[in-house]
Each structure stands twice: as C-alpha cells, then as structure tokens.
Image (tube, helix red, strand yellow):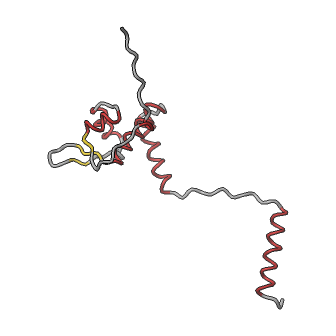
Amino acid sequence: MRFKKRPAAKSSDIIIPEKLYFRIGEVARLCRLPAYVLRFWETEFPQLRPVKSNTGQRMYRRRDVESVLRIKKLLYEDGFTIAGARSQLRDEIKGDKKQTALPFPGRSPADLTHIRQGLREILNILVPHR
C-alpha cells in the first residue's frame, strides 16, 4: 500500500497561537522545519534573533515566528537564494521606513481652468476691492 505524501502547507496557511514565547521545537513543528534549519537561519538572517532563557534555550517571540514564516516563503515558495532573501528582507524593512508616494492624479486643461476660476472667486471674496 502506497501513501501519498501530504503537500506542505504554505506559509500563509499557518496560524500562530497567541503566546508570548515559543521554544525552538514548537516553532519547528509550527513552521514544519527541522530545528537545525532554524538555528542555521539565525546565523544568516539578522532579523531572526530569538532571546535566550536563563537555561540557554531559544525563546522565539511572535515576530520571530513571523520572520521564520517570511523567510520560509521567500526560500521555499518564491525560490530566492539565502543572499537574495536576506536582501529582500532588508529592502522590505527599508521600504517600511520610507513613506510611500501617493499617485498624483492627472489634470486636464479644463480642470485647471475650473480650479483657477474657483481660486479667483475665493480671492474676490477675501479681497473685494481689487
């Protein structure tokens, strides 16, 4: 009897439980990754820095788990290399700090004429003796 291999869940399908801290084994099960991969990623991605308990155990916060899922998506689903994923994450962080530009709507000459006329009317109201 042959068993079908169950397809791996996408990173976006995983629900992170409401907890303050997760041990490395919990994160490994949750993200469906071996613990050694998580330890390796800590050396490759500066965004992934779990705190260590008094006993030296890695304690991942929710944002660390979200980072693991983002890294997993970049590497396994989007096909990035480690260097490419690192660069992508760095660019995303820089992009979050910058204000995104809003698109400037194009104006037709008729719109501009209408706007000028409205401004002149306002000016005549404010300064009637011109």
Q: Quadrant of the C terminus?
A: bottom right
Residue at 85%, 63% (x, y): give it. Answer: 110
Location of residue 20 in the rendering, given as x and y in whole percent from the top left corner: 28, 50
Q: Quadrant of the N terminus?
A: top left
Location of residue 120 in the rendering, given as x and y in whole percent from the top left corner: 81, 78
- In the image as oriented, which residue stretches furthest toward the front? 1
80 or 10, which is in the foreground?
10
The relative height of residue 63 versus residue 74 in the rendered view (above or below) is: below
The relative height of residue 120 versus residue 75 in the rendered view (above or below) is: below
Residue at 79%, 85% (x, y): give it. Answer: 125
- In the image as oriented, which residue stretches furthest toward the left? 55
Q: Across the whole image, how many numbered discs are drawn on residues?
A: 0
- In the image as oriented, which residue stretches furthest toward the bottom? 129
Residue 86 figure quarter: top left
Residue 16 figure quarter: top left
Location of residue 128 in the rendering, given as x and y in whole percent from the top left corner: 81, 89
63 or 36, which is in the foreground?
63
Q: Is residue 47 left or right of residue 26?
A: right
Q: Is residue 70 left or right of residue 60?
A: right
Q: Is residue 124 left or right of residue 32?
A: right
The relative height of residue 6 versus residue 37 in the rendered view (above or below) is: above
87 or 68, which is in the foreground?
68
Residue 66 figure quarter: top left
Location of residue 5 in the rendering, given as x and y in whole percent from the top left corner: 39, 19
